[in-house]
Amino acid sequence: MKRFLTFLLLLVLPAVTACDNGNKGGQDPAVRDAIFFGDSITANWVKDGKGHPEFFSANNFLCLGFSGKTTAYMKTLIKGITDKHPRQLVILGGINDIAMNDGVYVSIEETRDNIAYMASEATKAGIKVVICSVTPSKNFYWAPSVHPEQTIVDLNVLLKALADEKGYPYADYHSALADAGNGLPSQYTSDGCHPNQEGYTVMEGIILPILKSNQ
């Protein structure tokens, strides 16, 4: 009986070892053409009824949005993002910095520096980067004392300068979506801040040609 159990063990062990080596730590073997990395404006993009999940599935894109999170939090996740080795990384963040979601004031320069850090880490990993403008808004329903429209414009000036300096493509959602007062008009939003499906359609028309030309 002992000889029989030993024989079975010798048969099973090589098979288990081969499966572990082939799994490579459980990582998804698929290489994404792009990862969209951001906050709720990114997260909602892939949700049924709010965004267009088919935009991601049809183009081999992965949507990684973290609702309510600031660029300081996003920085802590960048290693996990670059470890997925997408061909391109689309970075959209900063709205929650302006809303002071972490309970502290964050200057637009600090937000720019956080995004610059994430972009640099992706570049070091051989990933092409696209920097996105923050989308327009005149009010945050969760932070009614904040009036963000001009701060968003000023942050976008810094982000555009960063993209120009480093040679990153710049996806200017703000210019395409903003009304005369630098808000997000009702045709593109239901809450004054987050794009609706029509808003995402406009954004897709901007980002998709950039990603295709940046391949």
Image (spheres, rainbow, N blue to C red):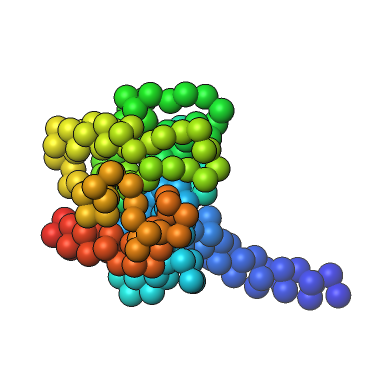
Q: Nearer the viewer, residue 52 or 151?
A: 151
Q: Nearer the viewer, residue 64 or 8?
A: 64
Q: Which residue lies at the image location 42% right of the left edge and 66% below the top edge?
A: 51
Residue 163, image x and y in percent?
19, 38
For residue 206, side relative to residue 52 (left or right):
left
Residue 76 visible at all: no
Q: Quarter-wise, where is residue 56 in the image?
A: bottom left
Does residue 53 sit above or below 80 in this rendering? below
Q: How many marks?
A: 0
For residue 91, side relative to residue 11 (left or right):
left
Q: Residue furthest right?
A: 1
For residue 122, side relative to residue 39 (left or right):
left
Residue 121, image x and y in percent?
33, 37
Quadrant into which the N terminus falls: bottom right
Residue 198 visible at all: yes
Residue 82, image x and y in percent?
38, 46
Q: Which residue lies at the image location 30% right of the left edge and 34% below the top edge?
A: 150
Quadrant into which the C terminus falls: bottom left
Q: Residue furthest front?
A: 180
Q: Which residue lies at the image location 27% right of the left edge and 50% below the top edge?
A: 178
Does residue 187 sit above or below 117 in this rendering? below
Q: Nearer the viewer, residue 107 or 76?
A: 107
Q: Which residue lies at the image location 50% right of the left edge and 33% below the top edge?
A: 145
Residue 170, image x and y in percent?
20, 46
